[in-house]
Each structure stands twice: as C-alpha cells, then as structure tokens.
Amino acid sequence: MASKWKALQQLNLLNNKLVGSIPEGICNLSKLEEIYLGNNQLMGEIPKKMGLLLNLKVLSFPVNNLTGSIPATIFNISSLLNISLSNNSLSGSLPMDMCYVNSKLKELKLSSNHLSGKIPTSLSQCKKLQVISLFHNDFTGSIPSGIGNLRDLQNLSLKYNSLAGKIPQSLFNISSLRFLSLAANNLKGEIPPSFSHCPELRGISLSFNQLTGGIPKEIGNLSNLNILSLECNIISGYVPAEIFNMSSLQVIDFTNNSLSGSLPMDICKHLPDLQVLYFSQNHLSAQLPTTLVLCGELSSLSLSVNRFTGSIPREIGNLSKLENIFLDDNGLIGSVIT
C-alpha cells in the first residue's frame, strides 16, 4: 500500500465489513490527513507507528473490536483535530501530558471502551476542544477543574465512570457549554449554583450520583434547556418554582430523591413542550395540580411513591398524547378517571 499511495491524503473505508488488523503500512503514508475506518470488524491493536503521520487531522476508528492501549504517540501529532475511537475494547490509561503538544484538538471521542486511570489534567491545554466524550469507561479520581478553562467546549460527557469528588464549580464558567452529562458516577456534594454563566445549556444529566443539598433556583435562568435529569441522588428541599417557568423544557426527571413540598398549582402554565415529568419516589405532598392539562405534549407522567392527597384531576383525561401515567403509592381518593 505505502509504495503505491505516497500522495494519499484521505482514506475512507467507513461502514463496511472489513476484518483483520489495521496494517502498519498505513503509517508510511506520510501525507495522510484523514483516515476513517469506523463501523467495521477490525481487531488487534492500533499501530504504535501511527504517531508518524505528522499531517494527520482526523483519526476515526469507532465501532470496531480494537484492543490494547491507545499509542501515546498519537497525542504528539500537533495537527490532529479529531480523535474518534469510541465503541471498541481499548484499555489502559490516557497519558498525563496528552495535550502538551496537541493544542488544536477539537473533538476527543473515546467513549464505550475499557479505559481507566485518572482523566489527565492536561486536557485544559487542549484549548480548542469542543467535544469531550469519555462516557462508559472506568475512569477514577476527580473531574479536573481545569476543564472549566476550555472556552469553546460544547459537549462534556463523562457519564458511567467511577469518578468521585465534587462537581467543579469551574464547569459552569464555560459559556459555550450545551450538554453536560456526569450521570452514573460517585459524585458528592451540592450542585453548584452558577448556572447563569452557561446560557447555551440544552441538557443537564447528573443522575445516579450521591449529590446532596437543594436544587439551585439559578437553573431557572437557562432559557434554552431541554433536558434536566437529576434522578437517583439525595437531593432535598423544595422544587424551585423557577424550574416551571422554563418554556424550552421537554424532560424533567427528579425521580428517587428526597424532595418535599408541593407542586405549584400553575405547574404547566409555562411548559408547552414538556413531554416527560418524573417526580416519583420523593416526599411530595398536597393535591395534584389541575393545570397539568396545559402540558399538551406530555407523554409520560410519573408521580408515584409520594404523599399526594385529594382526587385525581379529571382534566388529566384531556392529555391526548399521554402514553404512561404512574400515580401509585400515594394517598389519592375518589374515582378512577376515564
């Protein structure tokens, strides 16, 4: 291959049924700028000589059966913009100095592997990063606070790891951040209140951690938020009324916490696009709001295992898009709505 394709700049073999290992001869294609081998059935390790491709901008091998560690030499390619190795069986740790040379990197996608160790603090040196996707791995330690210095970051997904410690306050200084997913870790402490610095946030998922304290009312300032998921934590106190004034919300999931108080009587007055409303397994009380009918897009409603009283509002029967409703284990009385 190398003897024939000396001038090759792009190699795209995406979405085939290729088997075997990645040939080392690829590493001799010195002019190569983009290589796409994703969605195949490739096995074995990534050639260590891949770091010789000094003009490489895109390295994309997702959805294969690659094993072994990621060659440290890859992170010495200063021209790299995109590294995509998700959905393989890669193991080992990331080099602590992975961003000392590569300052141009925009996307780092290593999700769904078996990577372990700590997330390198040097990530803060990759100042052009827009996407960090490390979910479904075995990373431990804390979330590096320096990630908050990545001013272009739009998507940070670290869910399904074994990360511990508190959520760094610095993450909420990233004004460009759109999606924050830290679910299914061992994070503790309170949710930082400084959401007003992240006006572009569309999705927040902090579920399945050990977070305590209350829900910051400042979340209500996120006018573009679509998804707010805080399920399975130890969050307590009242649900801030400001949450129910966010007209862009489509999903609210506060299942399995220790929230108390009542739901506002005008709960759906400002939620025209809400599709999912989950408050089950909390300590909420009082009557169910009749204004639930104003959530015309609601498809799933779960308020089970709380302390709601009174009758089931007949108006709920007018929710034409409702597919699932769970009101079990409360103190509701009266007749079944039809």
Image (tube, rainbow, N blue to C red):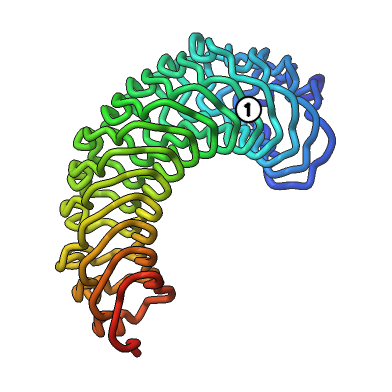
Please tell me whether residue 35 is drawn above or below residue 277 in the rendered image.
Answer: above
Picture coordinates of residue 322 (x, y %)?
38, 76
Kindly identify the residue that appears in the image at 27 percent across and 69 percent down: 308
Query: In the shown orientation, is residue 11 left or right of residue 213?
Result: right
At label 1, counting other C-alpha atoms closer than 10 Å, the crowd grade (few under 14, some 14-19, many 20 or more) is: many
User: In the rendered view of the protein, which quadrant contains the N terminus?
Assistant: top right
Question: For mark 1, what is the residue?
Answer: 115
- Out of 176 and 266, give the one closest to the viewer: 266
Inspect this view and state whether residue 154 appears.
yes
Query: In the shown orientation, is residue 192 left or right of residue 20?
Result: left
Q: Quadrant of residue 252?
A: bottom left
User: In the rendered view of the protein, which quadrant contains the C terminus?
Assistant: bottom left
Kindly identify the residue that appears in the image at 37 percent across and 35 percent down: 154
The amino acid at mark 1 is Leu
Picture coordinates of residue 67 (x, y %)?
75, 29
Q: Secondary structure at mark 1?
A: strand
Q: Quadrant of residue 38?
A: top right
Kindly identify the residue that appears in the image at 75 percent across and 20 percent down: 47
Picture coordinates of residue 48 (x, y %)?
73, 16
Please tell me whether residue 272 is drawn above or below residue 200 in the rendered image.
Answer: below
Query: In the shown orientation, is residue 319 left or right of residue 3?
Result: left
- Out of 71 and 217, give the one closest to the viewer: 217
Inspect this view and state whether residue 318 appears.
no
How many numbered callouts? 1
- Out of 278 and 225, give the one closest to the viewer: 278
Picture coordinates of residue 90 (x, y %)?
69, 29
Kindly identify the residue that appears in the image at 19 percent across and 65 percent down: 267
